[in-house]
Amino acid sequence: MMRNRFPEPMRPALVFALLLCLLLAFDGALFIDGLARRKAEYATLAQLAVVTSGLGLTDLAVATEARYTRHPAVSDPVAPFMDHPGAIEHFPTGAFWLPPSR
Amino acid sequence: MTAMAQRNLEKQLNILDYALSSLWRRRLKSLSVLLVFAAVIFLLASFQMVTKALSDKAREVLVHTPEITLQKMSVGRQEAIPLAYRDRLAGIFGIRRVVPRIWGYYFDEVRLANYTVMGMAVEEMPDGARLDTALASGTMPGPAGQGLVAIGQSIKKALALEGRTTFSLFRPDLSLKAFEVSGEFSPDTDILTNDLVVMNLADARDLFAIPAGLVTDLCVYVANPQEIDTIAKKISETMPSVRVLTRPQIQKTYQVVFGWRSGFGSICLLTALAAFVILAWDKASGLSPEERREIAILKVLGWQTSDILVVRFWESVIVSGLACVVGMTAAYIHVVYFAASLFRPVLMGWSVLRPDLHLLPRLAAGDILLTLAFTVIPYLAATVIPAWRSATVPADSALGG
């Protein structure tokens, strides 16, 4: 019996399943790394708690460009319109941050 | 029974094979659809992960925020609150402690950066004695430490201290006030302390030239946390000109501030929706002659309408499922490993001091389902009609024409 010189190609469904497995294995690796990062984050949580209560902080230091995006929780409600009544918001971060509703 | 199930499975596998090879035959088109779709999902999922990570962090951290913060409002703006207001608070039962603070922003005209300056007696604050544990080096400035400050990481970088411990800031009358760094906040607390310069109350008063008897705000601590709302109400009844911010209000702000309705969120959403509409339109608007011919040949070979529908369904599932996995994985990598670098220009705007954001989104099944619901399910729904239209093409008309 003559053997086929070329092996039979894999069926497409199998190739796709392999590709999917590869992607999911990659996601699994990301997940395991995420668990390690989460552990490290828990370790710093105690420090963050001390800083917050020790200094009475009210806001995250994400954007420092305008006082109402540096401290959205405690800035006065008219701050974004401080230049004149009806002034348009002109700081870029104002586009990302929703004005706090009170 | 098992033989039938096996036959059915084999049939589905064959149809899947056919769908895959038909996608592969049109690989350029399939790949471009996949990439556009993955990009849409990437954008949506990245935005969702950034806002989720930030609001999660805020929720975890802001449980320790002052129970009640008092600000004086005048002409719709915040202004300095008299220390004498403390005496008026003394009459309200249930208040454990009132701590005055002077804080505000110092604009450094050389580096064009805004610093957040805080002056308070840290030893009066809850956990104030433990603040040293949050420092990378040194100690917190005590009540007697004239001119001593604790600074955040970005301040150290901005002032280019590198071994030096002294620097000066300008008072409003442009005279210089010298400071000495006694402590430095750990980089791990960057998300809170990045731009902070913490000093005692007297130094802050001197730096900002605030008259004696005035402070920026008062932190009020109550004996029983259950009574925060009741005491807040009593305070605003006693002093109507004072804005009373409670801990739950501050926490709520951060659950709202990064929302789908925020400007950038809606831009992302609109872009994604526009891209999706184009995709769906492309799918839905008529069949190409090749597609008609293909269906006609399949029908002549004995395929049924339902089989062709199943092929189209598998094609959509493969494209949208793959796009979803690729898009969401890319979004996670973007947010966690690249600190959402695409969004940073918008998230931080013209800020000069930028914290190192260590974002770690907590992905729940609900978030993944939300992204799926926004992308894959509409795509599947939009491909049903063209699939049905294609499957009902009469064989003779397609081949004869």
Image: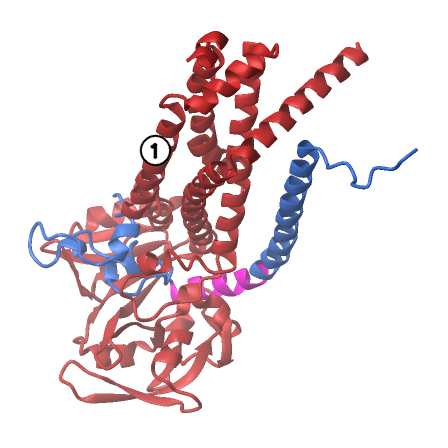
**For residue B400, above or below residue B226:** above
Q: In the visual, does B322 lie left or right of A97?
A: right
B341 left or right, relative to B25 = left
Assign a secondary structure to mark 1.
Answer: helix
Q: Colour of chain B?
A: red
User: Residue A45's x, y, as percent?
Assistant: 53, 60
Quarter-wise, where is residue A91 in the image? bottom left
Q: Residue at x 67, y 23 (%)?
A: B14
The image position of residue B56, as x and y in percent, is 46, 49
**Nearest the eye: B35 or A42:** B35
> Residue A57's image quarter?
bottom left
Q: Quadrant of the N terminus of chain B?
A: top right
Quadrant in which the C terminus of chain B appears: top left
Seen at 41% across and 24% down, the residue is B288
Q: Which residue is mark 1?
A: B278
Q: Which chain is blue?
A: A
Other residues around mark 1 within 10 Å, as few (<14) / some (14–19) / many (≥20): few
Residue B55 image offset from top left, x and y in percent: 42, 49
Q: Is residue B122 left or right of residue B326?
A: left
On whether residue A52 falls in the magenta region, the answer is yes
Which range of residues does the magenta coloring cover?
A42-56
Q: Is residue B223 visible?
A: yes
Q: Residue furthest left?
A: A84
B387 and B350: which is toward the camera: B387
Magenta segment, prevailing SS (helix, strand or loop):
helix
